[in-house]
Image (spheres, rainbow, N blue to C red):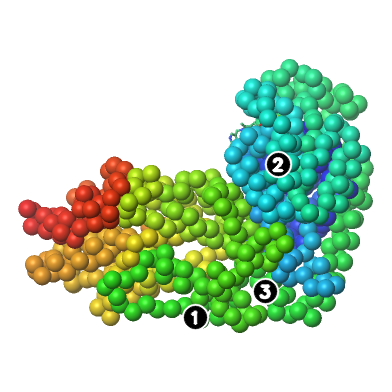
Amino acid sequence: MALAPVAYTLWQQFLRYDPQDPIWPNRDRFVLSNGHASMLLYSLLYLAEVRAVDPKYEVLGTPAVSLDDIKQFRQINSKTPGHPEYRLTSGVETTTGPLGQGVSNSVGMAIAGQWLAARYNRPGFEIFDYNVWAICGDGDMQEGVASETASLAGHLKLPNLCWIYDNNHVTLDGPAKWSMSEDVGARFRAYGWNVLHVEDANDTSALANAFQAFLNTRDRPTFIIVNSHIGYGSPHKQDKSAAHGEPLGEDEVKLAKKSYGWPEDAKFLVPDGVIEHFREGVGKRGRNLCQQWEKLFDDYKKKFSIEADQLSRMQRRELPNGWDKNLPTFPADAKGVATRESSGKVLNAIDLDTSTKTHLNFEGAGEFQAGSYAGRNIHFGVREHAMGSIANGLSVSKLRPFTATFFNFSDYMKPPIRLAAIMELPVIFIYTHDSIGLGEDGPTHQPIEQLATLRAVPGLVVLRPADANEVVEAWKVIMQLKREPTALVLTRQAVPTFDRSRYASAAGVAKGAYILADGGQPQVILMATGSEVSICIDAYEKLKAEGIQARVVSMPSWDIFEHQPREYREQVLPPGVKARVAVEQASTFGWAQYVGPEGVIIGMHTFGASAPLKELQKKFGFTPDKVFEAARKLVKGS
Ligand SMILES: Cc1ncc(C[n+]2csc(CCOP(=O)(O)OP(=O)(O)O)c2C)c(N)n1
Ligand SMILES: [Mg+2]
């Protein structure tokens, strides 16, 4: 409630936002990073009469949040969950709640704004010039990810970004001073931000001056520190419940109403004239701005039809025609190529830019830096958490981001991966150095439990292709996803490119798992992902030479496989075949569901070790001989 004057001044006087078109591409973005104050956002959406949008991006006549929705605060199936959820409630620009994420997403939104402007604006056609406003609290300031993203935003000198810090000196933990004593403003000045102070959150003219100062500052981001006091001088415990989403106590509510001179017993009271007041303020201003923009964009469409077409496809997450026409296929090659290498080739061959008719070479696609905001490569430095959160911010802005780092450090990105899945954002998280196969860097760099962890995230598609042609097929799958994030897990070391005239086509990747090699009715099934599939192929050939009929199932994506009809799944893994061996250079967690009670899992039960790859494979049992022996034992009983 202490933030109400801040939000009111911002929405009513500054925010360029049309409640009648909440998906207007050039709208200012408003992010409530302290998501536990969700009721503030719901009240704004209700009072400003923001309209609902359906999943087909059609603006509806119904409100995004009605008074009835507000009465259903935090109840099942309501539009007003405990924390604001993107997708669920129109007008919510990103899901917030995990502190630090919202402000970090806002950096991605600001980058997207600068990139869109640099790439699509033309003289006389400033079709993108939106600002991104984020309200945040002490918790956001304490979480590391916000420091990472603030540092990067300062480096990039993003002029369209404003963070408003609710400096109320209190966190859930108690007074903020128990755990924090730095000068936050000095920290942001050191990051290169413009730092402003508002002494009293109730001083709407001081707030307006600060917001105007942000608009006048076009060479760096702005940080406004607003001093506020939680509650109304009542005992601290009751104050805190108010701040953290739980409704105020009965007495608290009465006290508050009394202090505003309202009838103390009225509930859900919206005094006469309030809605009209918002209609005259943000409503009218926003509608005018949006209509002017629509006129401008109509002219833009006539002059720059290719660009306009790209923009409207992006808004709907549609691919350009012929995006896949230059995808390579890879000839059989026993020595092979690392999947991170083949993936790089595929990525550069995906033709996303039909205007220039050139193949993108991402390495040469330009660097996104202050002064060159049209670049496609963002240098995150060593900031994985920031990278994930910023990618989510780019994705809600309808760009299609991919990120890349070592698989082991997906741990540093888990919160944004999880939020991408919750928000149903098609962010592509690329991970290389995907197993102990990375060798000498040793156990600190060798992922073990990361595959199991990511496979457990609902809605996240995890893909670990086995060879170069599976990489191509994996990209075909990924590019067509509109609502699912992906983790693409790739090797550092070379893996053989299978002879697809001898084994099955890699097109089976689209089904998540497929029969790669088969000798008729199988006596034993060997299953694996990524670099371990070739070990299974070698074992398969040895078994064949011994007269044992084996089948190799390549399983690049459990998630996709689980979505196939039962008939297909049972065709690949016939329930009658109980002799099964799974091979993966990772935690065995989860494989039991595929090998069953009689099967064998060759996986990792400890952390890895620093040694050359060959030594590690011997030490941990990832050799064709081991797989062969396990399979033979299952079939022959010894
Ligand atoms: C990453 C994360 N950790 C913990 C929480 C639980 N939590 C919710 S509100 C809150 C206190 C936040 O303090 P502050 O940002 O100062 O908000 P205020 O209490 O001032 O509204 C905490 C720790 C959370 N939402 N996110
Ligand atoms: Mg606080």
Above-or-below relation of 245 to 605 = above
Amino acid type, mark 1: Asn
- Identified by mark 3, the residue type is Gln
Residue hosting label 2: 190
Relative image position of residue 347 (x, y in whole percent)? 50, 70
Position of 496 with respect to 224 (left or right) is left
Query: Distance between the Cα atoms at labels 3 and 2?
Result: 38 Å
Q: Which element type, helix, strand or loop, lies under badge 3?
A: helix
- The residue lying at 68 percent from left, 67 percent from top is 374
Q: Residues within 10 Å of mark 3 (few under 14, many from 20)?
A: some
Q: Quadrant of the N terminus?
A: top right
Q: For the residue labelled by badge 1, is the local secondary structure a helix, a strand or a loop?
A: loop
Say what amino acid the circle numbered 2 marks. Ala
**Sequence-wise, which precedes: disc 2 or disc 1?**
2
In the figure, 1 relative to 505: above or below?
A: above
Q: Is residue 596 visible?
A: no
Between residue 130 and residue 505, name the one nearer to us.
130
Where is residue 247? Give x, y as percent.
70, 30
* Front disc: 3 or 2: 2
- For marks 3 and 1, the one nearer the N-term is 3
Task: Say which residue label 1 marks.
Answer: 326
Q: Which residue is mark 3?
A: 310
